[in-house]
Image (spheres, coloured by chain):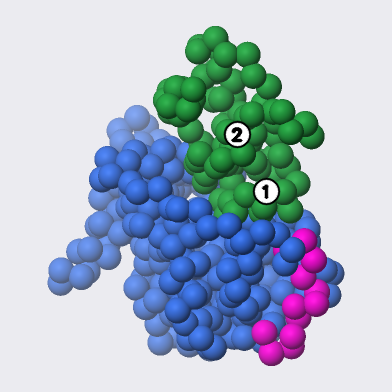
Amino acid sequence: MSEKTRIKILGGGCSRCKALEASVQKALASLGIDEKIDHVTDYSQIAAYGVMETPALVIDEKVVSYGKVLKPAEVEKILKSIS
Amino acid sequence: MIWDFIQNQIMGMKWLASLISSALTAIGVDVSSRWGGSLQFFIFDTLKICLLLCILIFIISYIQSYFPPERSKKILGHFKGIWANCIAALLGTVTPFCSCSSIPLFIGFTSAGLPIGVTFSFLISSPMVDLGSLVLLMSIFGAKVAVIYVALGLIIAVLGGTLIEKLHMEKYVESFIFSSGKTDLQAPSLSQKDRLVYAKDQMLGTLRKVLPYILIGVGIGAVIHNWIPADWVESVLGQNNPFGVVLAVLIGIPMYADIFGTIPVAEALLAKGALLGVVLSFMMAVTTLSLPSLVMLRKAVKPKLLALFIGICTAGIIAVGYLFNAIQKFII
């Protein structure tokens, strides 16, 4: 796993995690940002972020959302507020 | 009087049953025939369960939005000994839970210094009893059965967690659970609107997820209701078979379904002469233990503790089944 990836999705690979990944992809596409998304499925790594509910979204090593499937518009808002 | 009205019309939706009967009769279906009866059962139960599910999940999700796991973790930190187990079992009923979250939750509780017995009380009660099953059981079997079911579920959770604690099973928890960092995330503050949106999303998501199980469950229920002879059911799951409860639990454990999918099957079997304890222990077994959730839990605990967990739940559910059989004539 490369340290350079800025956007990570934490989750054991359940359907909700995949839904979150799809939302993030849509948000990135509509903002015209070219970033890779990492999918962290290893539970000891997920736990290291202190997340108790999956799926979670991590940007620049910070947990910005957890326990819910964000909609593309919500992801856009988060991405905008960070950059 | 008023309670009867609530029980029959609001919870039991008798009005919906008569509406469907008249509609079917109007288009020329004989609801007293086998096919007509099956059709009537199928339409009524599907609509009733979907309607209950939507209302329930909406209200419950709204309440749950006040109890994210982070908050449960903090509340639990204030309690010691068996009280912690009791509170864990109670919080298990209101904390939103999905089996894919069980490991992060396990880690979160453990790294916050909660004893594993408390975590297990939570893990047992969370799928076994929730607010939804309480209302759903009330609708089908009446208030007494529902309240006793939930109370017994909580007792299993408290006793199970306490037993795991007393047997010092910590060494059978996978080491990565203890080694992970202790980071506290701030629970996001939600506005009223956020909570309502969350509740709506949960409702639609749950409906989409469990609809296939409801249809399968109602389908099986309709077949039992009109095609399986009552004396078959009675001889296998009724008074004539002292091992009916054990049989129902063993069949129910590997099955993966939602309480919403098992209820029509339970309802139809009860109407055909199965004992109350048999159908309730079947429902408990299906919702509490399932292959997918056990595969998930196996990643966090070693086989010995997993076996103990399965053993405690199985024994508890079987005991609940026999207890319900014994008190059946007093409560329904």
Q: Is residue A18 above or below residue B211?
A: above
Q: Which chain is depicted green?
A: A
Pointer 2 and pointer 1 on the same chain: yes
Q: Amino acid at mark 1?
A: Ile
Q: Contact, CB < 8 Å: mark 2 with mark 1? A: no
Asked whether B299 falls inside the magenta stretch, the response is: no
Residue occupying the point 47% across, 82% down: B79
**Picture quadrant of residue B174:** bottom right
Q: Is residue A7 above or below residue B316?
A: above
Which element type, helix, strand or loop, lies under badge 2?
loop
Residue A46 is labelled as 1
Q: Label 1: few (<14), some or many (≥20) within 10 Å?
A: many
Magenta span of residues: B165-177
**Subunit of mark 1?**
A
Q: Amino acid at mark 2?
A: Asp
Given residues A36 and B316, the one toward you in this image is A36
**Subunit of mark 2?**
A
Residue occupying the point 28% across, 44% down: B191
Q: Is residue B273 above or below residue B117?
A: above
Asked whether B174 falls inside the magenta stretch, the response is: yes
Q: Is residue B139 left or right of residue B250?
A: left
Residue A60 is labelled as 2
Q: Of all residues shown, which one is farthest toward the right?
A: B303
Q: Nearer the viewer, mark 2 or mark 1?
A: 2
Residue occupying the point 60% across, 54% down: A50
Lower position in the chain sequence, tag 2 or tag 1: 1
Which element type, helix, strand or loop, lies under badge 1?
helix
Rendered location of residue B42, percent (x, y): 47, 44
Q: Which chain is depicted blue?
A: B
Given residues A21 and B12, the one toward you in this image is A21
